[in-house]
Image (cartoon, rainbow, N blue to C red):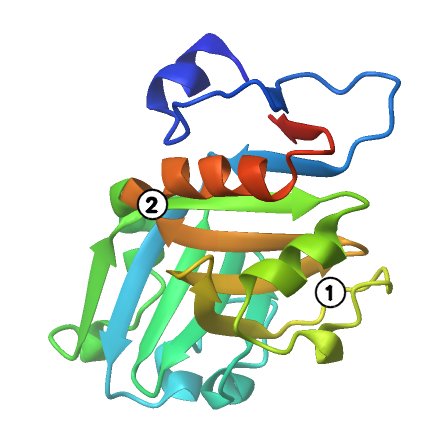
Amino acid sequence: MSEPDQINSAIKNRTQNITTEIGNDEVGLIVREVSGELKINIQSRVEARELFRNFKGINSSSLAKPCTFFEYDMGRIFLLGPYEWLISTRNNIDKVKTLFEKKYVGYFSCVDVTDGYTELKLSGNLLDHTLKQSLTYDYFALNLEEETESFRCIQTNFARVPVLFWKTSKLSVNLLVRRSYADYLIEWLSILNSEEKLVVL
C-alpha cells in the first residue's frame, strides 16, 4: 500500500497475525483494500430502463432484477432496492450526472457516498472457510470455484456487520462496508484465521 493510500486507508490496525507482503509461503487469506473508485448512490422512481438509457454497455431493462449488478463502460451498477442503485466508477460525479437525460432532473437524487464506505477484496485458500464463519447468507449459488463473475450482489451481514457482497472471480469476493466498520472486520478476520497467514494489502 503506497504512502498516500496508507493515509486515506480505512484499515489502520495491524496485529501479529497480519503481514503486509505476500511471501513464498502459502497464504491463507488475502485482504485488499480497493481504492480509486467513487461510490454514487442513485434514488429515483423513474423506471431503470429509462433512467440508465445512456449508460453504455448494459441492458438497462435488467436493472430492475433484485440482487444483481451490471458492468457498463465506466464501472458497475448495483441494485440496492426497488428505487435505489449504487454506481461504482472511476469517473467523477459530474460526469455521471451528464448521462441522465435533462427531462429527469428533479426526479432522481445522485449523491457521492465514497467517503462513507470501504471496499475490501477477499481471496485465498481460506476464503470458503472464512465465508462459512462470517456470512448469514447461503452463498453456494455463487459457485466460488468458477472463474466467472456471478453478477449477483447480496445485502447481508458479515461478522455481524451489514455489507454489500458479490463474487468477482474464482475464490475472490468483494465487500462494501461502512468505513467505520473496516478496521473491526480486519481485526475479526485476524482472530478467525489466527492459525494461518492473513495478508492485508
Pick whichever, 40 or 185, lies toward us: 185
* Looking at the image, residue 102 lies above or below residue 164: below
Q: In which quarter of the image is the C terminus?
A: top right
Seen as rendered, the residue at the extreme front is 195
Q: Between disc 1 and disc 2, whose residue precedes?
A: 1
At horizontal 21% and vertical 57% (from top left) the residue drawn is 111
Q: Which secondary structure lies at badge 2?
A: helix
The quarter of the picture where residue 110 lies is bottom left
Pick whichever, 159 or 71, lies toward us: 159
Q: Mark 2 points at which residue?
A: 181
The quarter of the picture where residue 92 lies is top left
At horizontal 55% and vertical 71% (from top left) the residue drawn is 153
Image location of residue 194, percent across then percent down: 64, 34
Image location of residue 5, percent across then percent down: 44, 20
Q: Distance between the residues labelled 1 and 2?
A: 26 Å
Residue 72 shows up from this direction: no
- 110 displayed left or right of 27: left
- 101 displayed left or right of 68: left
Q: Name the residue under label 1.
A: 149
Image location of residue 112, percent across then percent down: 25, 50
- 72 displayed left or right of 46: right
Q: Quadrant of the N terminus?
A: top right
Q: Which secondary structure lies at badge 1?
A: loop
| Residue type (three-letter) at the residue carrying disc 2 | Tyr
At horizontal 81% and vertical 16% (from top left) the residue drawn is 23
